[in-house]
């Protein structure tokens, strides 16, 4: 899942993710395409879990959208910025 994304990162960022550390990422909420909302500055963290799954932590987004445990959201990666 993350291999195409990790190839665009610095080596340090990719190693941190592989070693189980959180990596700060920017996320855009485009639920309302005409009013996108950006979450950045360390408020979003991507982490690789012990079972090779990934966790995306963005409390501000979850609270804003009223999301809870076991909710599923769709993600897509923009690689060419």
Image (tube, rainbow, N blue to C red):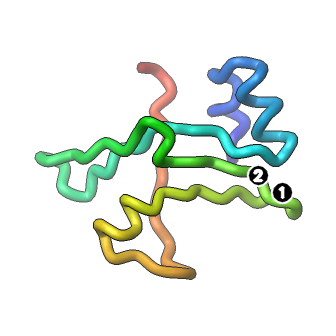
Question: What's the residue at 36%, 70% (across, down)?
Answer: 63
| Residue lying farthest to the front in this orientation | 42
Image coords of residue 35 (percent x, y): 14, 48
The reply, left or right, for residue 19 in relation to residue 30 is right
Kindly state the secondary structure of the residue where label 2 is placed.
strand
| Quadrant position of residue 69 | bottom right
| Quadrant position of residue 11 | top right
Residue at mark 2 to residue at mark 1: CA–CA distance? 6 Å
Task: Give the labeled residue for mark 1.
Answer: 52
Query: Foreground: 7 or 26?
Result: 26
The reply, left or right, for residue 77 in relation to residue 4 is left
* Disc 2 to disc 1: CB gap under 8 Å: yes
The reply, left or right, for residue 50 in relation to residue 6 is right
Q: Quadrant of the C terminus?
A: top left
Image coords of residue 32 (percent x, y): 18, 56
Query: Foreground: 17 or 53?
Result: 17
Task: Give the labeled residue for mark 2.
Answer: 48
Q: Is residue 60 above or below residue 11?
A: below
Q: Is residue 6 above or below residue 55?
A: above
Q: Is residue 56 above or below residue 1?
A: below
Foreground label between 2 and 1: 2
Image coords of residue 62 (percent x, y): 40, 67
Question: What's the residue at 58%, 56% (across, down)?
Answer: 56
Specify few, some or many for label 1: CA neighbours under 10 Å numbering under 14, 14-19, or 20 or more. few
The disc label shown at residue 17, or none: none
Query: How many marks do you count on the picture?
Result: 2
């Amino acid at each position: 899942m993350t291999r195409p994304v990790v190839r665009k990162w610095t080596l340090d960022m990719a190693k941190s993710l592989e070693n189980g550390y959180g990596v700060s990422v920017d996320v855009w909420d485009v639920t309302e395409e005409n009013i996108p909302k950006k979450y950045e500055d360390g408020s979003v963290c991507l982490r690789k879990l012990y079972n090779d799954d990934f966790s995306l932590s963005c409390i501000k987004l979850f609270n804003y959208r009223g999301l809870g445990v076991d909710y599923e959201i769709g993600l897509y990666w923009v690689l060419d910025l």
